Image (cartoon, rainbow, N blue to C red):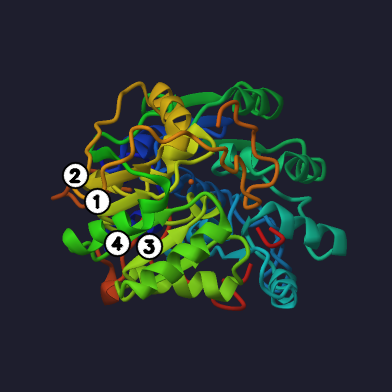
Amino acid sequence: MSFTDLGLADGIVRAVTEHGYSIPTPIQAQAIPAVLAGGDLLAGAQTGTGKTAGFTLPILHRLATSGTPHASASAQRPIRALVLTPTRELAAQVEESVRTYSKYLNLNSAVIFGGVGINPQIKLLKHGVDILVATPGRLLDHMQQGTVNLSKVEILVLDEADRMLDMGFIKDIRRVLAVLPKNRQNLLFSATFSNEIKALADGLLNSPAMIEVARRNSTVEVIEQKIHPVDRDKKHPMLAHLIKTNNWSQVLVFTRTKHGANKLVEQLEKDGISGMAIHGNKSQSARTRALSEFKDGSLQVLVATDIAARGIDIDQLPHVVNYDLPNVPEDYVHRIGRTGRAGATGEAVSLVCVDELDMLKDIEKLIKRKLPSEVIVGFEPDLNAKPQPIQRRSNDAPGRRPQGRGNAPAKSAKAPGAKPSGPNGQVRSFGGNANARPAAPHRSGGRGR
């Protein structure tokens, strides 16, 4: 099956083809026809499967072929499609994807999120926007100031809906829903289908088509997963040892807290390992710089909290390390999904101390498999060590669910979902552009979220 076979407009197929894609991934092959049919959709897929294109491509087709509602070129364009995402990075990547594949269409797009000035966004919205990608907090800011008009929205997308619920955005989402036209198409995309997601879908969607291309809460099979038992005070030396011994050149490391991320970066720097942290307390410019340097290979280690787990899309990322196990078992799936994307192989390593054994059990129960364990010589854990209480929640994710114990089409010659390089060597990702870099005013864009 090709993108032409899916019935997409010639301009969209041309843009897709120019970037080296020809074969839709499974989620795209199912979601695109469903969205084109005009009905509501509830779709679930593992991270890295290209679900962003599952809604961006058919939305572009529907808006391009249904005609523009404004009477003349001088009339302001109304917002016809609204995409809500949980994080700034994901919002930027989604809008980049929209912009890339609307290259030959008379449509425009914009992204708005917090952490940057609101005035450039206000100016941009005044000119008129067909497709708006936003985080909930900043969208509410614009709604309160009367600088955004959502009365003409035809299509609503909730992207990474499970993450938005985890982060406590449900009230914000409901406030947005209250001002949207009742007659609209609703698309809900989620990496996991929790009971909360099903409840949200029941209240939002009207007789939706349902797509789930992977086993619920499954982990990508091409990712090699293992744990290294270690004492809590030996995690940093072990990580430095693994990076140096294995010559890891690009490593994404997850910590439980923002303070832990900052401390780890300082420790790694003393070991001669370049690293930067990305979390909710970092300015948008610092977050953008860290992602940019990590993606281009000039930064060896990026240390992140779960706030960034869904917004990092890096081509061929080889290694993900859980320095701390996540508070919420589902976050393990999203974390390791940063590697092994689009059919590529990857390695996910978890450093587990005695304090985290209950967390490990919860993760293994969720993914329905026992993770292989490997003790590193020189870092053998003390078998008599007693567990100590650990911080169960980071302020990075307000409103997170309490835990009971303790976030592409392929080249024809590649596996579905492979990410070929576009012109100028930039990697184009249907899950969001791997080189997305916010730049005012077009890429400006929740309220510190």
What is the quadrant of residue 301 in the picture? bottom left
Q: CA distance from mark 4 to mark 1?
A: 31 Å
Contact flag, marks 2 and 1 (Cβ < 8 Å):
yes
Relative to 373, is 311 on the left or the right?
right
Q: Of the residues shown, which amino acid type is indicated by label 3?
A: Ala
Which residue in the structure is indicated by mark 1? Answer: 418
- Closer to the N terminus: mark 2 or mark 3? 2
Q: CA distance from mark 2 to mark 4?
A: 34 Å
Which residue in the structure is indicated by mark 4? Answer: 240
Q: CA distance from mark 2 to mark 3?
A: 18 Å
Residue 200 drawn above or below residue 5: above
Q: Of the residues shown, which amino acid type is indicated by label 4?
A: Ala
Which residue in the structure is indicated by mark 3? Answer: 434
Q: Of the residues shown, which amino acid type is indicated by label 2?
A: Ala
Q: Residues within 10 Å of mark 4 (few under 14, many from 20)?
A: some
Q: Residue at x 28, y 63 (%)?
A: 250
Q: Of the residues shown, which amino acid type is indicated by label 1?
A: Ala
Which residue in the structure is indicated by mark 2? Answer: 415
* Secondary structure category for the residue under label 2: loop
Where's residue 268, x and y in %? Answer: 37, 68
Contact flag, marks 2 and 3 (Cβ < 8 Å):
no
Q: Residues within 10 Å of mark 3 (few under 14, many from 20)?
A: many
* Secondary structure category for the residue under label 3: loop
Where's residue 91, x and y in %? Answer: 56, 58
- Closer to the N terminus: mark 2 or mark 4? 4
Foreground pick, 260 / 32: 260
- Closer to the N terminus: mark 3 or mark 1? 1
